[in-house]
Structure formats: C-alpha cells, structure tokens
Image: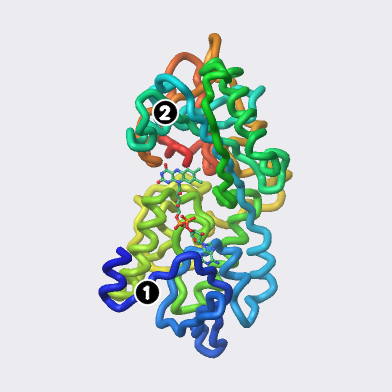
Amino acid sequence: MTDDIQRLGGQVLLNTKVTGLEQDLETGRITKVIAGDQSWEPAEVISSLELRATVGITSPNAPKDVRDAAQGLRYRDFITVALVLDGKDLFPDNWIYIHEPDVEVGRIQNFRSWSPWMVPDESKACIGMEYFVFSGDELWESKDDDLVALGARELEQLGLAKASQVDFGFAVRVPKAYPMYDRDYAERVARIREWLETIPNLQQVGRNGLHRYNNSDHSMLTAMRAVENITTGTNHDLWAVNAESVCTTRSTSKTSTRTSRRPPPSRWRSRSPGRRRPPRADAGHPQAPVRRRRVVRGGGARVRRVRGSTSRRSATSRGRGRARRPSPSSRSSPSRPGPRPAIC
Ligand SMILES: Cc1cc2nc3c(=O)[nH]c(=O)nc-3n(C[C@H](O)[C@H](O)[C@H](O)COP(=O)(O)OP(=O)(O)OC[C@H]3O[C@@H](n4cnc5c(N)ncnc54)[C@H](O)[C@@H]3O)c2cc1C
C-alpha cells in the first residue's frame, strides 16, 4: 500500500504524531493538519485517532460540552506476557478464556495455532498470558520480570504447565486496547458525533476512532467506506459498521453501511437516569474479575476454549453447565439473541 501511495505521489510518514487540527469556523472544514513541525492543508481528513484525541487537538477548541464528553471516554488497557516453554503446545486451541477467580490472567493465547511462523522452533511452545488492566494500576506498574514470574506461576496454578518449563518471557503493554462501554459512553459519543457532523471534511474511522468495539475487519471497513465517501461521492454512515455491538435493543434490520450520515439513533442514548445502575470501576470490560465464573468442573484449569481464528467467530461452549462470558455489549442487552463475536 505504501508503494502504491508513493507511486501516486503521496507520502507515508511513520512515527509522526499528529498534534493539531485547525478548523475554519465559517465553513467548519479542517484547513490544517499539524504533525510536529510540519503541517498540511488537506482537502479531506480520515482520522483513526481516538475520539478523545481528535477532540483535544482541534483548534479553535471544540465546544466545552464536547470536550467534557471526550474527556469522559474511558479505555481498558492490556498486558500480554509471552512465555516461551520447552516442549509441545499446551493446548490445540487459538486461545482459552480463564474463568478461575484465583488468578489474574483472563485469557491465554497459543501463538502457534494462529501461525506456525509465530513459533518457528518446533521444540518450544509460546503462549500469551493476557491481563486486562488499567494503565497505572498495580499490574501495569509491575516490573516485566515480575509479570513473567506471575505468568509462570499462574500457568502452574491452572494446571497447564510447570512454572519451571518456562524458558523465558517478556511483557508487552497495550494502552487503550479496549474502548469502554460504561454507563455514559453512548451519550458522550453521541454528543461528539453531533459535533463531528459539523466538520465536512473530517471522517473518524477504526476502533478507538469511533469508540466502538470494532475488530480489524470492521476497522478496515470503516476506512474503506470513508475513502468511498470521498472518491465516489457515497454517503456511507461509518457509525453503522458493527452497529449491533452497541445496540441496546433487538434490531430487526440487517446492518447496512449504505445509510446516510444521519444523527445517532435514539437507542444509542443512555437509559433514563432512573434505570441507571451505579458505575463499576471495571465496568465495560469482559474480563472484569467480578464477572468471572467457574464454568468447568474437574481438576486443572477452568477454562472456556475457543477454537477458530478470527475475531468474528463465535465462542463455543462445551460440556455441561458451561456459561458464555458476556461481551461488553451483552451487558446492556442481556436478551440479545444469537451467538456473540469472540472477544478481541
Ligand atoms: C488484545 C487485542 C486482541 C485483538 N485481537 C483481534 C483479532 O484477533 N482479530 C481482529 O480482527 N481484531 C483484533 N483486535 C482488534 C484490532 O486490533 C483493532 O480492531 C484494530 O487494530 C483497530 O484498528 P485502528 O486502525 O482503528 O486502530 P489501531 O490499530 O490502534 O491504530 C491506530 C494507530 O494510530 C496511532 N496514533 C495514535 N495517536 C496518534 C497521533 N496523535 N498521531 C499519529 N498516530 C497516532 C497509534 O499509534 C496506532 O498505530 C484485537 C485488539 C486487541 C487489543
């Protein structure tokens, strides 16, 4: 893609932080994009910056209530602790969900099941112990060595391997991995969206760009639709992509991206104050410890296994009494029918 862009006279700048969007108040258009000491005068802007950032770097400032709405958006952060072990893979699945309340790990990836090239040494296995955290909390601030030790310890606690099998490991922190669906997010997003509608040459796309639990397919689709809007004059509503993940009522129509860029449907707006529950510190994340359940009886790990490769594949439950871990959207729509997308 970079080659294509360059062949057509474009530039791809890596490691270049966008720090400002200047807006013409009369037309509403973005007239300047600033990245460090460089700037451009764009005809069109497609942005996958998190909504909070886009609102924060626009000048003149967005209206105060829009800035407040953006500041209130929350994210769940993520740590994966990759452990390299001597011996065979610990399980054949791509990943397993951990429902055991006595450990911190929420999910374990088996990297070779995604691709043999991820673990090219046949004599080793490599897994990813996944921790769903908040930036700045105890786990986030832990030293990498301590996280590796924790991962190895929990692996043994779950009965999947001996800690001594772990050859080495390392930790990777991913800030803002998950846009949180807390009590107020829909109202906040709706207000920001109203404001975005007043900027004719700016389109937000992606996951945090729309504060939507989009997987990479959805994220790319929003970007492709945005390009079509520019190049072919369509009027795709990018907020309609993966819209079912935010619905709080049962939808009778199929999701379409061919709808116009209209204001948010009323079901996006938060429930009436009288029906609101108090917010939980960990609200909005599927791995919140408070929601963990033991779903498998018998020794060893209590896990739900997911075989399959893509995030759109539904999680399967096997065995008596197993429960499905709710996705963030299912929390607000417990009666929503059909299989849920796996969590990614
Ligand atoms: C743990 C985890 C597992 C996942 N597993 C899957 C999976 O199995 N399948 C799947 O389909 N999806 C999966 N996803 C979701 C997938 O990663 C996202 O849907 C996708 O990456 C979103 O793409 P995006 O372009 O919107 O955002 P990103 O991929 O986050 O890209 C945004 C980019 O913007 C850059 N940026 C931020 N601020 C600025 C700035 N001011 N200036 C310039 N650049 C900036 C960031 O550095 C980043 O590179 C997973 C996500 C997580 C967190």
Could you say whether the residue bearing mark 1 is in a helix, strand or loop? Answer: loop
User: Vertical placement of 140 versus 62: above or below?
Assistant: above
Q: Return the residue at label 1.
A: 11
x, y percent for residue 86: 46, 22
Front residue of 316/173: it is 173
Q: Does any portion of residue 107 appear in the rendered image?
A: no
Q: Tell me the kind of residue under disc 2.
A: Val
x, y percent for residue 198: 52, 78
Farthest residue, direction top: 298
Q: Locate residue 37: give its quadrant.
A: bottom right
Q: Does any portion of residue 67 appear in the rendered image?
A: yes
x, y percent for residue 303: 51, 22
User: Vertical placement of 309 versus 136: above or below?
Assistant: above
Q: Return the residue at label 2.
A: 306
Q: Tell me the kind of residue under disc 1.
A: Gln
Residue pictured at 43% horizontal, 26% vertical = 125
Could you say whether the residue bearing mark 2 is in a helix, strand or loop? Answer: strand
Tag of residue 330: none
x, y percent for residue 164: 57, 19
- What is the basis of the colouring in this image? rainbow
How dense is the environment of label 1, judged by Cα within 10 Å: few (below 14), some, or many (20 and up)? few
Instruction: Report whether 198 appears left or right of 10.
Output: right
Farthest residue, direction bottom: 26
Front residue of 281/158: it is 158
Front residue of 139/234: it is 139
Q: CA distance from mark 2 to mark 1?
A: 41 Å
- The numbered mark, 2 or 1, whose residue comes first in the sequence reads 1
User: Vertical placement of 283 versus 146: above or below?
Assistant: below
Instruction: Report whether 164 appears left or right of 206.
Output: right
